[in-house]
Amino acid sequence: ERHNTEYFTPNDERQTESLDIVHHYLTLLLDGKLYLAPLGNDLQKVLDVGSGDGIWAIDYADENPNTEVIGTDLSPMQELTVHEKKRESSTASISSSILEYRTINGRTFHSERHNTEYFTPNDERQTESLDIVHHYLTLLLDGKLYLAPLGNDLQKVLDVGSGDGIWAIDYADENPNTEVIGTDLSPMQPKWVPPNVKFELDDATQPWTWPDNEFDFVHMRFLNGAIRDWPALFREAFRCCKPGGYIESGEFDPRYYCDDGTADDNETIKTWNRVFEEGEKRLGNSFTVIEGDTQDAGIRDAGFEDVNVKVYKVTSSPSPCICLHVSGKTDSGADFHRKAPVGPWTADKKLAKIGRFTQLTLENDMEGYTLFLCTRILNWSNEEYHVFLAKMRKVLRSTRNIHIYCKYKYVYGRKPLA
């Protein structure tokens, strides 16, 4: 109803199938042609008004790869990724090769068109896992989508490494007057999204094609295992951030930690940790980014100020059997440190819920976080790999007695006004 036009047909899958049939018989009616006008072969730009499901625009673009084709419609019922003139720019370049996914043991991964080797799949099972992660991270941040002190009048927000787009969609829902752009290596986002959000295929490790001072807020999280040059990433974010705008980087350490000795002799947990440590060395992309000061130092060195850091230690247990530890430091020199004791003597519902969801994430798709690393980077056999998964599932079922946790680190900073 955002549009004043009252159009009489629906925009669902059934209607899309009908439009495809209409397109087919109209093409037959025109003797196999897409148009009757006496056009040349050197057209630069074509507009398809009322594009519907986009099939005419897609067919025209396929036949004329050197022509830029734009289709417009009241509804976003078109395919997310279509054939487009190939360009050198990383943000703008989208082609059919994007959909040529690699398949490993039945799981699909992003196209080899990108130079970045990202370790998780882009299929429906992984999407479900990402939704669970988003839910417990929102709980971790007390129901918020970010920590930076943003205002309510932001014009443009960039979500780097958007995954299935859930953060960008939630932010767009909460801020209907803000334009939100999510970028990722794979078109794994849903077709139906708020009108103020759009997704673009982009490799964030390549030079960004956005203009200087374009965004009020640059958000990125869970880029662990995808980035080789973190300082370069933060420099690009600084360039594209408006003066007075913010950057926020949220990362996690996939290794498990234990403070009370209950996991010291557990060989399966040690193997889990070695997968990411060895994977980092061989792949060349960091999984231990939060261990040092990569985020905060990189953000400061890029030119951001008022940098704030928060580190969370979160249990992977369904029962609240350890503590949630939050600590950090601000550029003003103030330290903050908070420890919430959790154990048999307390029933912290928030921590119990986060613990259940962290465990559910792995139970839902442990394979998605380890398949590529174990079988393609570390060269494990399928038998060796599946034995490891079985042992790790047993560990997850024993977290009442094995008190393991993961670390999360959030860093945000502001671009100076001048």
Image (cartoon, rainbow, N blue to C red):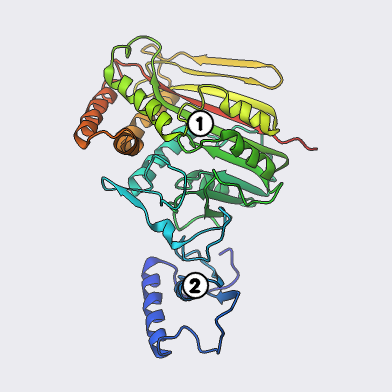
Give the residue type that dot 1 points to: Glu
Picture coordinates of residue 418 (x, y %)?
80, 37
Q: Residue at x 36, y 78 (%)?
A: 21
> Visible in this render: residue 364?
no
> Visible in this render: residue 314?
yes
Q: Residue at x 49, y 37 (%)?
A: 223
Q: Residue at x 46, y 38 (%)?
A: 134
Q: Nearer the viewer, mark 1 or mark 2?
A: 2
Q: Are marks 1 and 2 in contact (CB under 8 Å)?
A: no
| Left or right of residue 148, residue 173 in this image | left
Asked where in the image residue 159 lies, by quadrant, the reply is top right
| Label 1 vs 2, first from the N-terminus | 2
Seen from the viewer's position, the closer of residues 241 and 99 is 99
User: Which residue extends farthest right?
Assistant: 418
Task: Name above or below for residue 387 compared with residue 239.
Answer: above
| Left or right of residue 64, residue 178 in this image | right
Seen from the viewer's position, the closer of residues 166 and 218 is 218
Label 1: which residue? 251
| Left or right of residue 272, residue 11 in this image | right
Label 2: which residue? 61
How far apart marks 1 and 2 lie (CA) works out to 39 Å
Provide the secondary structure element on which disc 2 rests: helix
Picture coordinates of residue 294 (x, y %)?
57, 27
Picture coordinates of residue 323 (x, y %)?
44, 16
Seen from the viewer's position, the closer of residues 224 and 48 is 224
Provide the secondary structure element on which disc 1 rests: strand
Picture coordinates of residue 100 (x, y %)?
38, 57
Give the residue type that dot 2 points to: Ala
Asked where in the image residue 128 lies, by quadrant, the reply is top left
